[in-house]
Image (tube, rainbow, N blue to C red):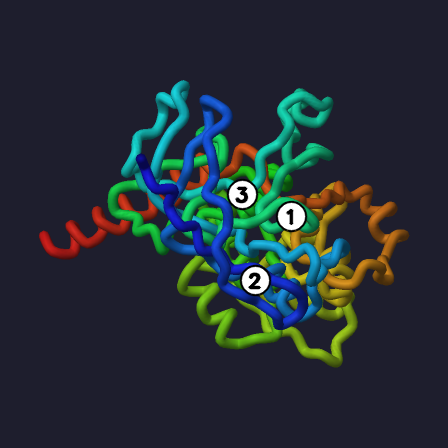
Amino acid sequence: MDTVPHNPACYLYGPGDAKFEDSPYPAIDDPYDVIIRIAYVGVCGSDVHFWTHGGIGSKITPNNPLIMGHEAAGTVHSIGSSVTTLQPGDRVAIEPGYPCRRCNRCKSGRYNLCPSMTFAASPPNSHGTLRKYYKIPADFCYKLPAKTGLDEGVLVEPLAVAVHVTRQADIRVGMKVVVFGAGTVGLLCAAVARIMGAGKIICVDVNASRLELAGRYAGAGTLLPSRSDSAEETAQGIISGHGLPFEGADVVLEATGAEPCIETGIHVLRSGGTFVQAGLGKAKIRFPIVTLSEKELDVKGSFRDREDWGEGVDYRSRTVRESNESVGEHEEG
């Protein structure tokens, strides 16, 4: 008789209270399910917030602990009878949320807005990936390129978020893009915008070392704003200091959630430009609504991701290929 594998997991009982305990081994009850043996799980800013505050909105309680983790990669352990796209041993990145597939949002293609979304590590009852074995529908697993490690596979999740943000902005060849925030998501937004054909990218941050990385990693121009300048002054400094048209940038990708950055982003855009909010900060902020209206700006939110994982994996594969070609040219020279 086969022995059911142990499935150790990290449960969070409340702020600062985590315990490693055994969790139920997942059973394949749908022919399109797969079970993944988790290799790596990343730590997102939301995980840190859960650790320090016990949740975002819904709170974790000691009587109903939650398995954490949603940035994950691993190998396929077993597959349902109808799965044809994966085999045991395949190395995959995991899209951590899957929808109902039946509601109006799903049918319209915006499944990230599904009201019945099952998303990893969402209280009260949707456990996450920080365990040995994890079950998910096969079409929410993405094979990793041969030269991409499982540790790198974890980063496909924030990369997919950045792909979604930039697709929300509909970036096209030659556009002038300003990215506020040079943390993980901001840097990835800048890199994806470059791949999508942006003609000029400017990263804004208050951390000089982050900006130095943005210049090297994404080929971006940078601005370290003065904390004493107004939003209008900072916007003008971005425009004049980086040779933007006098009207301003075509696109702003806001990845900080900080009120001064949001305000500056509205002022740095040209009339008819596009503003996409990716960063989360205070629930309510002061906002230059008159400027937004007079410029007739397109303002969009960005929630998680959808149909962005395949594109993200392709970007990663393309980057590896171009890097190898560059090395080959260097060796031949």
**Could you tell me which residue is drawn at 58 percent across and 34 percent down?**
98
Q: Which mark is residue 203?
A: 2
Q: In the rendered structure, which amino acid carries the disc numbered 1?
A: Val
Rendered image: mark on residue 60: none
Asked if the residue under mark 3 is in contact with the one under mark 2, i.e. CB atoms within 8 Å, the reply is: no
Toward the bottom, the furthest residue is 228
Is any atom of residue 18 visible in this view?
yes
Viewer can see residue 247 = no
Q: Quadrant of residue 37?
A: top left
**Of 331 and 186, the residue lying toward us:** 186
- Image quadrant containing the N terminus: top left
Q: Residue 300: where, in percent of width, then height?
A: 73, 43
Marks 2 and 1, how far apart at CA: 12 Å
Mark pair 3, 1: CA separation: 28 Å
Residue farthest to the right, as pictured? 290
Q: Residues within 10 Å of mark 2 (few under 14, many from 20)?
A: many
Crowd around label 3: few <14 · some 14–19 · many ≥20 (10 Å) = many
Give residue 251's mark. 1
Residue under numbered circle 3? 96
The kind of secondary structure element at disc 1 is strand
